[in-house]
Amino acid sequence: MAANNLPADEEEFRNFSQDEMEEMKTTFEAGNLEAVAKKLQEKLETLDKIQLHIAVTGETGSGKSTFVNAIRGLGDEDAGAAKTGEVETTMQPESYPHPTLPNVTIWDLPGIGTPNFKADEYLEQVSFQKYDFFIILTASRFTTHHTQLAQEIQKMKKRFYYVRSKVDADLYAAQKRRPRTYNEEEILQKIRNDCIENLKRGAGELSPRVFLISSWDLAKYDFHLLQQALEDDLDVEKKRAFILALPNISAQILEKKKAAFKREIWKLALLSGAM
């Protein structure tokens, strides 16, 4: 087999360390396909076992459980869906494995916002160390409970993302109130600005980023921006698991999944001696 058959794009090798890449290249150029195939097999098995834990938190009524279902591509009535309701239905962290990727788990955490809420105690209660990142939801304004939680998460060297949920309900109400002057973009920007100003005042953040979503239609609003932010912040190995776990809500996500699968195909082809 000619050495130049090895894919030149280093993106394909980003799951390998520099030393592994050099070793693979040397072994490949020496014609030892069996050793290369063995190394690839070991790496594929390792990747399939990588765990990704996503925590979803927010006050009661913010739509946490519906978001947990939506991000897994499930409706509230589907088998395996998180329980939803107008009252708090989550008293302990509830784990929900991805329907087709058992190594990806979405966690529905208990609601925040009780009178005696303490962010540090809450994080200990939910075993914060197990999660790769936190999604902090609100269906209205971000309060001191949200900002205290974000500050504690930051102290613990974990990433978090502010998400304003149920924007579809806000748009519907605005259209009913003022049908003649209704402007969707202006209303969305007003919601975004309001959230940002609250976070600046409450958390002292200079440029907080807020993602506007509707769990009933993830293809609209800012879900694609949230998805991109998460991808950018995850390490290479966990990024692969995250991309494959995303619901098929847009052509962009489908293309990313397609690219991820293509990267696996050439590896499997090499393992089988087809390359």
Image (tube, rainbow, N blue to C red):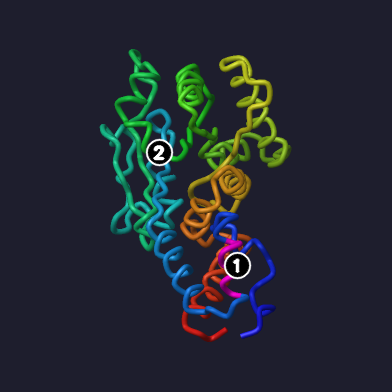
Tell whether position 37 is magenta: no
**Is 9 placed above or below 159 here?**
below
Tell whether position 24 is magenta: yes
Toward the left, the furthest residue is: 91
Q: Amino acid at mark 2?
A: Tyr
Pointer 1 or 2: first along the chain? 2
Magenta span: chief secondary structure: helix
What is the x, y in percent for residue 260? Answer: 56, 65
**Is 12 placed above or below 215 here?**
below
User: Mark 1 to mark 2: distance in Å?
Assistant: 27 Å
Tag of residue 78: none
How many badges with numbers are in the image?
2
Residue at the spot 68% in from the left edge and 42% down from the top edge: 184
Q: Secondary structure at mark 1?
A: helix
19 or 239: which is nearer to us?
Answer: 19
Residue identifier under label 1: 259
Would you say the residues marked 1 and 2 are in contact, meaning their CB atoms lie under 8 Å apart?
no
| Residue 211 picture quarter | top right
Q: Amino acid at mark 1?
A: Ala
| Residue 195 picture quarter | top right
Q: Which residues are magenta?
A: 21-28
What is the x, y in percent for residue 257? Answer: 55, 64
Q: Quadrant of the C terminus?
A: bottom right
Residue at the spot 61% in from the left edge and 65% down from the top edge: 12
44 or 60: which is nearer to us?
Answer: 44
What is the x, y in percent for residue 163? Answer: 54, 36
What is the x, y in percent for residue 141? Answer: 54, 25
Tag of residue 131: 2
Q: Secondary structure at mark 2?
A: loop
Task: Bin the neighbour count of mark 1 within 10 Å (Cα to Cα): few under 14, some 14-19, many 20 and up.
Answer: few
